[in-house]
Image (spheres, coloured by chain):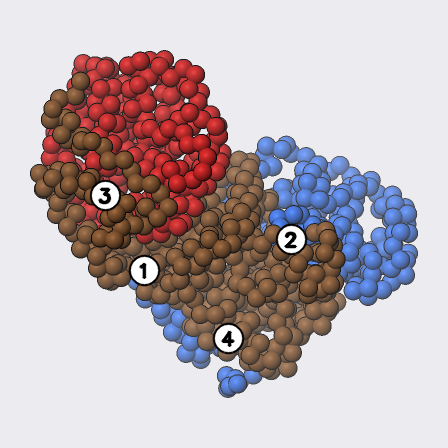
Chain colours: A brown, B red, C blue
Amino acid sequence: MSAPRPGGYRAAAREVLRDRPEVRTSVMAATHTFDEHRRASWEEIDADAWRDWMRDVKSHVLTHLDVYLETAEARLEANGVRVHWAETAGDALAALGAVAEAHGVRRAVKAKSMLSEELGVNAFLEERGVLVRETDLGEYIIQLLGEPPSHIVGPAIHRSVDDCRRLFGEKLGTAPDASPEDLAAAARAALREDFLSADLGISGANFLVAETGTVALIENEGNIRLSTSMPRVHVALVGIEKLIPRLEDLSAFLQLTARAATGQAIGTYVSLIQGPRRQGEPDGPEEVHVILVDNGRTRLLADERAWEALRCVRCGACLNTCPVYRQTGGHPYGWAYSGPIGAVLAPGLLGLEEAMPLPFASSLCGACAEVCPVRIPLPELLVYWRERAVEAGLAPVSERLGMNAYAAAATRPRLFGAAATLLRHVPWELGGRALPVLGSWTAQRTAPPAAPRTFRSLWREGIE
Amino acid sequence: MRPSSACCPKHRAPDVRVALFATCLGDAFFADACADTVRLLRRLGVDVDFPEGQTCCGQPAFNAGHASAARRMARHTLDVFAGADWVVLPSGSCAGMLRAVFPELLAGEDHERALDLAERTFELAQFLVQVMGVDRLGAGLAGTRVAYHHGCHALRELGVHDEPLALLRGTGAEVVAWEADRECCGFGGLFSVKLPEVSCAMADRKLDTLPEVDLVTSADGGCLMQLSGRAGRRRGRVPAFRHLASVLWEATSA
Amino acid sequence: MSAPGRAPGGDGPASGRRARILARVRAALGGRERVTHPGDFTGPRPLDARGSDRLRSFEEALVAAGGEVVRFASVEEARRWLADFAAAFETISVGATVSAPLRPDRPVATPGAAALGVSVARAAVAETGSLVLDARDGRRTQLLPPTHLVWIRGSDVHVTLRDALLDLRGGLPSAVGLHSGPSKSADIGQILVRGVHGPGRLIAGLIVEDDGPRAAPSTP
């Protein structure tokens, strides 16, 4: 994936809305389905109690993260896993590259991993002559298209069945009227080759259990189980925030994450990986590596407010309910994580300036906070990052001056009343040149009809 | 956003004295709706005052990250309404600002004052149902097909959902089911002009799913401006867009 | 491309990166209030609403996810059914720990070529409809053949996932797979398809030799 470009959000959003309306249609439908399923499955449980508990466990881990990282490392090493520590994306890629080189890897299979998108794994390995095949069907589709993922859970939700027919017809030789079953069968056959011949399997991790050194992964297709079982070497990329304390804690996390993401009671396949193949086991990788990745997470952890965003379990529920995300899908956000969580992680992981304008890409409707399984206060954090942006001088000068003038007027009632009277007479349709903000309104909306009088003046005359 | 506690004892006029907070948008663009709010409350026997020192609750500044500007406006608002028994607003988002945000925004003594103000502050429909115990205003809307847009702050910050629906049904109106009724309209204050294309796509989503109705109403002027503004540029039949206060007054006075 | 100056093993305690990351974590946490672990999760579980017959709950959950369940009162009954069932498959692959009576008498092929894979589950979970599969039985047989038959004893079915995990903790192999239905994906235009990568058909052969209750789960 190319360098993050959140700065292009407005232009990219405008472009997709204007030139590719089918994306909005596909994304709207897919997210609606996910959210409906989530809602129905939460009604079967005491969702409030589950969410409180998961929030507290994650907050506990994050406020004891050094202890849990050391415990996890000790367990992993005792299980025969090689543990690497990566401060930056460069460190992580270097560690991965070293493993690939040491084993003469020519071909790798990859399970879906948002962290690997964040790090830019595919481009890095391909530059070194390693063929990387995405095995998750949605990731496979966008890999063939040469696009980044549009959603945390469903990378290709912005694409229709017809898009897939055209794509698979071109790349895999399927018939023009192929059914979804035929298309899936073609992908299965093509990827089966890759599973059987790959030298290296790369995955992320949904959770890392400190107590047992278990890497836990959730999926529905089986490609993660295959990617982590078939090749000789398995490398798991694990963000340091993925820790959870005990194996039994996994029970609630596995279930609520699945319910939040797709409404399922549990993912079809859960992999609990302790380490490489043992004496007497018929198969499995000979070597397992875990790369523990910081890449800005400690910076976010240090933030007194925004550290709570590190509780995220990557379920995508906030995307599914976000009315802003649903208009365009994930591409305009310009990096691996989109929607509300993307906007809240970006200033911490990428830096405040690089993250602009994502914290402003929200109407603060609050729908996201209602569905987050770990109760991240997303709207509050969006406002928090906006305050930090204003303090850092990243808001337009005209806006800052305008706000200060507005506040000055708002503490002087007579001035405020006079200004209100005047402003109502600004012709919105023509005012666009003088005040671009008005032009932004009137380009696609009629101006509000100016009331003949202010309420203030009506009151003074007496209301009958 | 936290829904603020909403339970309150029922009160009977003529004990009730309300200070109206018209809001900056109300004063400039929805004067008639504010006047109808006064008429409606007076019809119920409530004494209504309009403290003239009022200006803006500071929400546009707060949402845009200008916390110190927002604090100045919040403190001013606390001063203006210090003596009021009840504060009523024809705006869910501004009521939410006072109830849910002011206490978080202000520290020390002002924090205490903000908590105190929050307890006395209500959005109009919330006030009518929870404090005045009203369930039936006049039947003047009998036969009217109405769609209700739930503003985000009223819904999620104040927990107001059933109250406006109950009041509308009490007028004889038919409140028609609307798939996207609780989705954000795309106004979001400055969001509507900073990211106008996405904002309009959000309004389109609302309007695309709108059933055949005579009237669209809401407790928030900003939302009405957004929806009616976008509807005005689209093809097809456009229903009337009117503020809830005016709709209820019309039903009562008919 | 430069490699770190050692074999591609772990970083070890001497690594500067490790020390710096841990130092940054400690510095980040600084004086922040530490949150205590809330303890065991004892909230109401979905199964409470569905009743206490764990075998029926297991069956319902697995079938709702697209799996199939066949019940037998004895290994002998299962064996007879198996002879009939397996006849339709040209080749089979069988897990290393499947007992003799439960191995079909059909030509054996590698897991990648076999039409039917037969495994034994170490345990199962009623509330999620999951089969707990152990790497010692063989992962390829659990994943590659398009039809997957998994034997499970009624007495090995736990009520909750938590119980199953507590039970696993003492003896974890290199990998455990929780399989809760046939492979599925909705990535093509949101339309559900089966058998993308993993088996498109999952059958649990549930052997209930007595009606005795499961051994008491570990107490919270």
Of labels 3 and 2, the one closer to you? 3
Q: Earlier in the sequence, mark 3 or mark 2?
A: 2
Q: Chain of mark 4?
A: A
Give the distance between the C-alpha atoms of the residues marked 1 and 4, in whole angstroms. Answer: 26 Å
Amino acid type of the residue tagged 3 in the rendering: Pro
Residue that appears at 63% across and 44% down: C128
| Residue C65, percent from left and from top | 68, 44
Q: Earlier in the sequence, mark 3 or mark 1?
A: 1
Q: Secondary structure at mark 1?
A: loop
Q: Residues within 10 Å of mark 3 (few under 14, many from 20)?
A: few
Q: Which mark is residue A303?
A: 1
Per the rendering, the mark at residue A162 is 2
Cα–Cα gap, marks 4 and 2: 36 Å
Q: Residues within 10 Å of mark 1 (few under 14, many from 20)?
A: few
Rendered image: mark on residue A93: 4
Residue that numbered label 3 is attached to: A427
The reply to whether residue A245 is visible in this rendering is no
Q: Residue at x 42, y 44 (%)?
A: B202
On the same chain, marks 3 and 1? The answer is: yes
